[in-house]
Amino acid sequence: MANPPFSARLADFHRSVGRSTVISLILVVAVGVLDPAPSLAANSLGLSATYSVTANLSYAAATTHVLTTAMVSNNTAAIVGELSFNVAAMRTGQAKIGYVAVGGVAVSPALDDQTLTVTLPTPLAIGAKVAVAINYSANLSTDAIGKNWQLGKLHRIVTFYRWIPWLSRPVVFDRPNFGTPYVTATSASVAVAITTDQKMIFGTTGKQTSISGLTYSFSAANVRDFNFAASPYYLVTTGLAGLVKVRVLYINLPATKLLNNAIKAINAYSSQVGAYPYSQFTVAESGGGSAMESPGMIYVDDAETSTNVPYIVAHETAHQWFYGVVGSDQASEPFADEAPTDFLARNLLGLRRASKCSTDMLDRTVYLYTSACYYETIYIQGGNYINSYRLHIGETRFWQGMRSYYSKYRFRMGGTREFWAELDAAAGSLATSHADRFPSYY
């Protein structure tokens, strides 16, 4: 059977999410000289995009329909023939891709694992922009098996993590540990409108801009993904970390402990590394799975013990600095993502300890560490390695290097090599070789 026209499918989607949902796709045409050999490498990290998202969320039925329009800009030095989007919902929820359109023209993308590759009807010229619309529907998971909770409804709480199709490169989802198989660049602007079937309380990466009936609108700037948690049963408490408003959304977890530890962490890391860049920070209880970071918010599992809350909050909040503001390839370089983060958390709380696994290299990908030793190697050994360097070069030089790394790669992509380059520069004559633990870089 032939596919129905794009206009008909768009109308069907509008009906599925309500009459208030209207998406206008705008194709911006840039005039330029086309290279006769466009790049077909499915790596879109060098491009930029803004995202406009409308979603229908049925809390009662645990289903969602999502329409994302990515306005993609080609700021590279070559014309582009195809785009890669990370669509983690294909692996964390029972998602099904609907129509995909480029500049209003329906296309047939290729889905492999969690990567959606969109071949452009016309190659995108240098400096040009094009609107890419991606529609999918999903049943929310109701169990916490694997990473299912990341697009799920558990214990009366809905969680949406990495649910927006986002420019990326092909990344394999499955790994032998709980490492993070993602890599995304910062977007200057994300606008999200969510229509629900009942009143909800939301915790999101962005700030709420309006409520119209049961449609909740949010916006965020300079974020590398946009996530949320929601429940009609959330209770809310707030406080301040300097000028940053801290919100805690909870049902069962100790709200005061969550709030106080978040404030403590934000104040400490802002002083040591650089200012927290957003006006709001949200700590949201989740209904299962594990604690998780997101720009402007963190998730804390409702089964977390009160004793472990200070560490969990300190660690996930530190990700605002490393992964959130300073990005990295989390799949290929887990050290750059997790080691500085865990160093900050354990330094704040005085929880330094020895690793329970044998000394190992710190430059492997997330796919090459066992489940038993991933945490003990990347988090514990990695954080201890950083701490030993701090003791070697002294407090002043060390924190100068940390601040330099944060400032230089703010809202950009850093990495392991970039991290050590800034710390070594600050160390001066005290800099030492890292070849023994990072042989692939040195």
Image (cartoon, grey):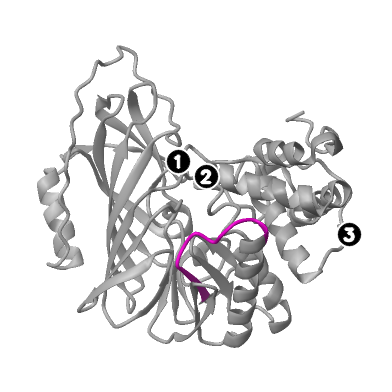
Res. 363 visible in picture = no
Task: Name the foreground residue: 237 vs 164.
Answer: 237
In this rendering, the answer to whether 243 lies above or below 277 is below
The CA distance from mark 2 to mark 1 is 6 Å
Q: Which circle's residue, 2 or 1, is located before the other in the chain?
A: 1
Residue 270, position as x, y percentages in the image? 61, 62
Residue holding disc 3: 354
- Residue ID at (58%, 73%): 300
SS at badge 3: loop
Inspect the magenta stretch and tell me whether residue 210 lies in it.
no
Residue 136 tag number: none
Task: Name the foreground residue: 26 vs 178.
Answer: 26
Question: Which of the image's four quarters has the C terminus?
Answer: top right
Question: Residue 106's image quarter?
Answer: top left
Q: Are marks 2 and 1 in contact (CB under 8 Å)?
A: yes
Residue 183 tag number: 2
Left or right, residue 132 beside residue 75:
left
Residue 27, position as x, y percentages in the image? 17, 38
Inspect the magenta stretch and tell me whether residue 279 lies in it.
yes
Q: What residue type is labelled 1?
A: Ser
The CA distance from mark 3 to mark 1 is 36 Å
Left or right, residue 127 beside residue 150:
left
Residue 168 tag number: 1
Q: Which circle's residue, 2 or 3, is located before the other in the chain?
A: 2
Q: How crowded is mark 1: few (under 14 residues within 10 Å), some or many (20 or more)?
A: many
Residue farthest to the front, as pictured: 396
- Residue ID at (65%, 42%): 333
Question: Residue 252's image quarter?
Answer: bottom right
Q: Which amino acid does label 2 sit on?
A: Val
The region drawn magenta spans 272-284
SS at badge 2: loop
